[in-house]
Amino acid sequence: MIPPDDHGARLAAAAEAVARRMDTKPLIGVVLGSGLGAVADSLEDPTTIPYSEIPGWPTSTVAGHAGQLVVGRIGTVSAAVMQGRVHLYEGYAPWQVVFPTRVLSLLGCRSLVLTNAAGAVNQAYRPADLMLINDHLNLQGSNPCTGANLEHLGERFFDMTEPYDRRYRELALAAAARRGLTLHEGVYAGLLGPSFETPAEIRMLSGFGADAVGMSTVPEAIAAGHAGMRVAGISCITNMAAGLSEAPLNHEEVMEVGAQVRDSVVGLLQDLLATIAEENLNDAS
């Protein structure tokens, strides 16, 4: 589904509604996956805005997504943290899935940190591991930039050679080392869902070079790339993909493992956001 003719006006209205409730312009945007809402607790002077109070902002129907935007400071840098996201499998169109990403860009965010829960395709991974995304496979059958181009956001044809910023990956690896955490680097495959993959599909993904698989993140990374935002992505490995273990896959397992590693992920994200904030501040000076 292509965006409506008034897509640009809808984005502007949402950005204006959020801006009216902020004291400063955010430089960093963060999208939190299931069970990671505690990252927002580290913000200073937070302002919480339910998604339902932002015109046009889509609301998630998935358990574990709080559905609110928290705006606050990391040191002296303002950040906008999304507690929950929407997915294509919920019935949303691609332009709706990335609506929040584009609003964050209009608000002034130069950086976007994406998190998700994912299944392990790489057999060296185990549940509760973390993976730093260095590239992705868009296997969702759509692109959020389909339709009339929003020239004020980005060019019609844009480069995706480095969808996940190299410098941010270095910062994430350094933050993980300081905390004694193992942080794999790998390729994230984005599929449509909501069904989990079959064993044959996992063998296919392995052959394609995927290390983890999930149902989010890719549209947001593409939209951020279109808008010129620098992106970092972290996956919490919550299960072995189909055919790699005897256990059947279910969403409860995803939530349980996410809860087990929440403190590690929250700590890593807090360190990463602090270093990105420092770099944004230095770039602005």
Image: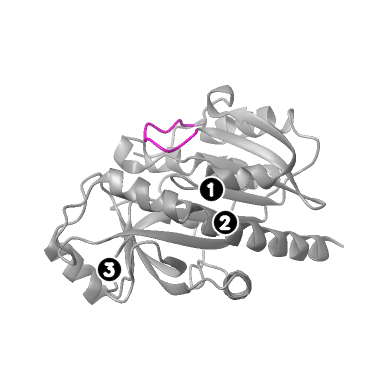
Residue 151 lies left or right of residue 98; in this view the side is right
Give 251 or 152, whichever is nearer the viewer: 251
Instruction: Kindly tell me whether residue 217 is visible in this rendering.
Output: no
Mark nearer the N terminus (2 vs 1):
1
Local SS, label 3: loop
| Residue 24 rendering spot, x and y as whole percentages | 80, 40
In the picture, the disc for residue 113 is 2
Would you name the residue on which mark 1 appears? 31
Residue depth check, mark 3 versus mark 2: number of the one nearer the observer: 3
Circles 2 and 1: CB atoms closer than 8 Å: yes
Pick out the residue farthest to the right.
285
Which quarter of the rendered picture does the C terminus lie within?
A: bottom right
Give 136 or 118, whichever is nearer the viewer: 118
| Residue 132 rendering spot, x and y as whole percentages | 48, 68
* Residue displayed at 38% across by 40% down: 2
Q: Amino acid at mark 2?
A: Val
Give 229 or 21, whichever is nearer the viewer: 21
Q: Amino acid at mark 1?
A: Val
Residue 62 drawn in magenta: yes
Badge 2 density bin: few <14, some 14–19, many ≥20, Cα 10 Å: many
Above or below residue 20? Residue 148 is below
Give 234 or 36, whichever is nearer the viewer: 36
* Residue displayed at 60% across by 36% down: 69
| Residue 58 rendering spot, x and y as whole percentages | 46, 32
Q: CA distance from mark 1 to mark 3?
A: 23 Å
